[in-house]
Image (cartoon, helix red, strand yellow):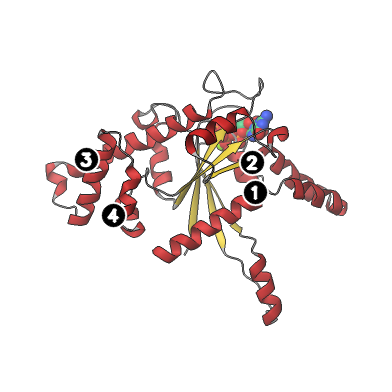
Amino acid sequence: MSFKCGIVGLPNVGKSTLFNALTNSSKAQAANFPFCTIDPNVGVVPVPDERLSKLSKISNSKKVINTTISFVDIAGLVKGASKGEGLGNKFLSHIREVDAVIHMIRCFDSDDIQNVNPDVNPVRDLEIIETEMMLADLESIQKRLEKNNKKNVDEEQLKILEIALDCINNDKDISVLKTQFDTKQLNQSGLLSIKPKIYVCNVDEQSVQNGNKYTNDFIEKFGKENTLIVSADIENQINELAAEEKENYKIVQLLRQQAKYILILKKALYELKLFLMKIL
Ligand SMILES: Nc1nc2c(ncn2[C@@H]2O[C@H](COP(=O)(O)OP(=O)(O)OP(=O)(O)O)[C@@H](O)[C@H]2O)c(=O)[nH]1
Ligand SMILES: [Mg+2]
């Protein structure tokens, strides 16, 4: 089963930088202007798994094939995207295609890196993105529940859409659907707001170990269970250094130890994949 993970967020928050770090490439153009990415970049990466190397040693395997995850670097969304602002609602089909969402959130100060909002506020930024995804869902639900279209929707999907509509209209938690329907049924609904998600707070070098005031605010509101703190820029620089300075292996390894968060992120996604495989 191919597992696809979409990187979603406001423009210029570091999504393509994270994509390059995760896929160990420079495939995605990462630059300091909003809407740098228009068409999605896709990269497939093997997931490191020490259990696999142990098993291959025991069984003397000739070939070891790691499981893979596809990452999709999606264009930045802005407030009003579902109604055509920014790059409009092209993003919808790109998010609809993925199995899980990585929300990338800016948690670093920089006068140089343009921000589409006047200040750094990760809680507000995530709420903008989630609201746009919810508004997009609302529109698609309403279309499918219109009299003419309703007859083409099966009974189970109808129930999902009606509950989702009630949640969105009355500000209730849409994840309640997960207690009543399985992942396969929910995937079929094509709703964006119920996709499994991980939050990635993009921080500067100094905040990698302990976070900063922005990550504290974010975790206070959204919890730390699904939140990872990463410096996409640093991870990316290490990858580039590793490619250039193969002979300086020790230095690269040392840096890697300090910045192992990308590996943690890949592992977290792998666990998510295993979990979804069990229930699908
Ligand atoms: N200071 C700082 N700059 C960063 C960090 N992460 C990314 N950047 C820079 O921010 C700029 C935007 O990064 P991108 O990765 O292109 O951002 P994006 O979210 O893909 O942007 P769009 O495709 O336009 O939506 C680039 O110049 C990066 O080098 C970080 O952690 N700290
Ligand atoms: Mg980009």
Query: Residue 143's mark?
Result: 3
For mark 1, what is the residue? 262
Kindly indicate the quadrant of the structure image that contains residue 32.
Answer: top right
Give the Cα separation between the discs numbered 2 and 3.
39 Å
Give the Cα separation between the discs numbered 1 and 4.
34 Å
Q: Is residue 153 above or below residue 235?
A: below
Q: Tell me the amino acid under the disc marked 4.
A: Gln
Front residue of 54 and 98:
54
Quarter of the figure that contains the C terminus: bottom left
Count neighbours of disc 2 (C-alpha within 10 A) and say few if under 14, some if 14 to 19, many if 20 or more: many
Q: Is residue 101 above or below residue 90?
A: below
Front residue of 106 and 237:
106
- Residue drawn at (34%, 52%), measured in percent from left and top? 178
Across and down, in percent, residue 188 comes to: 31, 55
Query: Is there any visible trace of residue 130 in the rendered image?
Result: yes
The earlier-in-sequence mark between 1 and 4 is 4
Kindly indicate the quadrant of the structure image that contains residue 131.
Answer: top left
Count neighbours of disc 1 (C-alpha within 10 A) and say few if under 14, some if 14 to 19, many if 20 or more: many
Ligand 2: give its quadrant: top right
Across and down, in percent, residue 105 comes to: 55, 34
- Residue drawn at (31%, 40%), measured in percent from left and top? 137
- Indicate which label's residue lies in the foreground, 1 or 4: 4
Secondary structure beneath dot 4 equals: helix
Give the Cα separation between the discs numbered 3 and 1.
40 Å
For mark 2, what is the residue? 230
The earlier-in-sequence mark between 2 and 4 is 4
For mark 4, what is the residue? 180
Give the Cα separation between the discs numbered 2 and 4.
34 Å
The earlier-in-sequence mark between 2 and 3 is 3
Q: Tell me the amino acid under the disc marked 2.
A: Val
